[in-house]
Every structure is written in structure tokens, then in C-alpha cells.
Image (cartoon, helix red, strand yellow):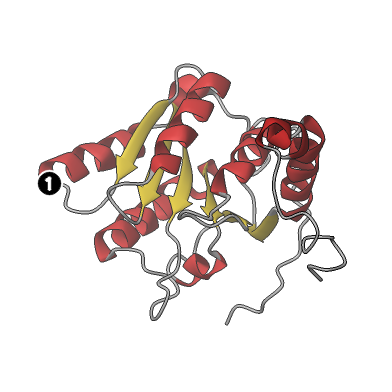
């Protein structure tokens, strides 16, 4: 393969040409198309068609680890798309008082949208949601019904922990150094605006 690319003849990269070859507008357009076409509705029993009013909506982010830069980027993009929306973040080692405030805010909102940045464990649990987060999610699911919709970034197995949810989407971007979760942020926003319908097909079977 290397020989077919001529790497044995010239293995040097012209640093001045990188920006004209990598990460171009054409590449970005392909990424957006792949994300838009692959977002999958794991569950859609209502909720995706509900109009979103930012002032009465809480955006709840549940992240697996403390330091997840993608969560910060997601809040920035959601804030730009939905001015006035409240954003709440759940991560490890939060106080009971803070969690109670999150619970009250979410229950008091007319609508809740949930972003799940909880990648699978490399060796072990494929759906490592914390017990307290599962408890809150299930309470919100029962209280909000069709007024709650969630997006899982890279992990369809989370459906097993919240099987009563009416609307759960999945994009296939993972976190980490090689992750591409942000590719799906724009798709998530467009779905919430009613501009995109998820038509992807899950490549695995969930039990």
C-alpha cells in the first residue's frame, strides 16, 4: 500500500499545504452529511415533533467524566442555537444539594432535552450510567413523557438503562482523543429545530 502511494519515493509532507488538503470545506460537508444521514432513532414514541421553546426548556448534559471538553463545546453550540435555554451538567462527585437543584429545575421545565456523553467502558459495562443519574432520568421520563427527548453520543446501549424513554437518538461519535462527538452536535440541533428527521439504522441488535 505504501509503495502504491509512492511513500518509498517521497515520505515528506509539505506543511504549508496541509490546510489545503486536510479539513477543507468539502471534507466538512461530507462529515455533516454522514452525521445527518446516520443519526438513528432508537426509540420514537413521540417527542421528536414537539415544538421547542428555549425559555421553557432545560438542556441536561450527563457526562461520564469530569474533564470532557466536548461537553463545553456542546453547551456553546446549543446556547448559540437556542438563546435563553438553561443548561445543566451532571458529572462525577457532585454534591447532593447541587443534584437536588438540577432535579428541581428539570422537573419545573416544560420540556427537557438530554445529551448523554457517556461512552462505553473499554472492558466491562457498555452502559455505565451512574445509578443516581439513572434514577433522575427515569423520574423525568415518567414526569415529562413526550416532553423529554435524549441524544446519546456514541452509545446505543444506554437504552437498556432507561427503557421507558419515549424518544432516544444515537449518533456514532465517540469521545476521547480520536473521538468525533462534535460532528453530531449540529445534527442534534437541527433535529430539535425540526429541520432534520433521523433516518439511520442501528448496525447492532439491542437485547
Q: Residue furthest front?
A: 9
Residue closest to the eye, 22 or 185: 22
> Residue placed at 69% from the left, 57% from the top?
40
Specify whether 3 is left or right of 125.
right
Specify whether 205 is left or right of 71.
right
Above or below, 52 against 27 in this view is: above
| Dot 1: element | loop
> Residue placed at 69% from the left, 30% from the top?
16
What percent of the width, then of the height, locates residue 103? 27, 43
- Would you say residue 162 is visible in this rendering? yes
- Would you say residue 163 is visible in this rendering? no
What percent of the width, then of the height, locates residue 167? 59, 53
Q: Quadrant of the C terminus?
A: bottom right
Q: How many marks?
A: 1
> Residue placed at 45% from the left, 65% from the top?
162
Residue closest to the eye, 42 or 204: 204
Q: Residue furthest top?
A: 83
Q: Quadrant of residue 60?
A: top left
Residue closest to the eye, 158 or 76: 76
> Residue placed at 79% from the left, 50% from the top?
37
Mark 1 Cα-neighbour bin, 10 Å: few <14, some 14–19, many ≥20: few
Q: Quadrant of the N terminus?
A: bottom right
Q: Which residue is mark 1?
A: 95
What percent of the width, then of the height, locates residue 24? 75, 33
Specify whether 29 is left or right of 149.
right
Specify whether 111 is left or right of 93.
right
Above or below, 110 against 207 in this view is: above
Amino acid at each position: 500500500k505504501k509503495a502504491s502511494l509512492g511513500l518509498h519515493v517521497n515520505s515528506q509532507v509539505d506543511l504549508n499545504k496541509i490546510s489545503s488538503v486536510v479539513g477543507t470545506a468539502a471534507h466538512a460537508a461530507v462529515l455533516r452529511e454522514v452525521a445527518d444521514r446516520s443519526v438513528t432513532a432508537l426509540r420514537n414514541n413521540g417527542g421528536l415533533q414537539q415544538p421547542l421553546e428555549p425559555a421553557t426548556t432545560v438542556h441536561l448534559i450527563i457526562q461520564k467524566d469530569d474533564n470532557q471538553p466536548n461537553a463545553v463545546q456542546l453547551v456553546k453550540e446549543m446556547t448559540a442555537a437556542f438563546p435563553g435555554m438553561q443548561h445543566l451538567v451532571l458529572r462525577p462527585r457532585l454534591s447532593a444539594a447541587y443534584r437536588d437543584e438540577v432535579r428541581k429545575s428539570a422537573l419545573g421545565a416544560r420540556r427537557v432535552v438530554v445529551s448523554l456523553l457517556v461512552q462505553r467502558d473499554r472492558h466491562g459495562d457498555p452502559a455505565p450510567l451512574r445509578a443516581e443519574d439513572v434514577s433522575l432520568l427515569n423520574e423525568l421520563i415518567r414526569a415529562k413523557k413526550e416532553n423529554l427527548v435524549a441524544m446519546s453520543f456514541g452509545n446505543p446501549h444506554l437504552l437498556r438503562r432507561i427503557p421507558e424513554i419515549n424518544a432516544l437518538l444515537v449518533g456514532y461519535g465517540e469521545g476521547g482523543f480520536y473521538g468525533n462527538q462534535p460532528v453530531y452536535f449540529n445534527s442534534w440541533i437541527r433535529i430539535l429545530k425540526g429541520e432534520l428527521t433521523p433516518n439511520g439504522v442501528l448496525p447492532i441488535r439491542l437485547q
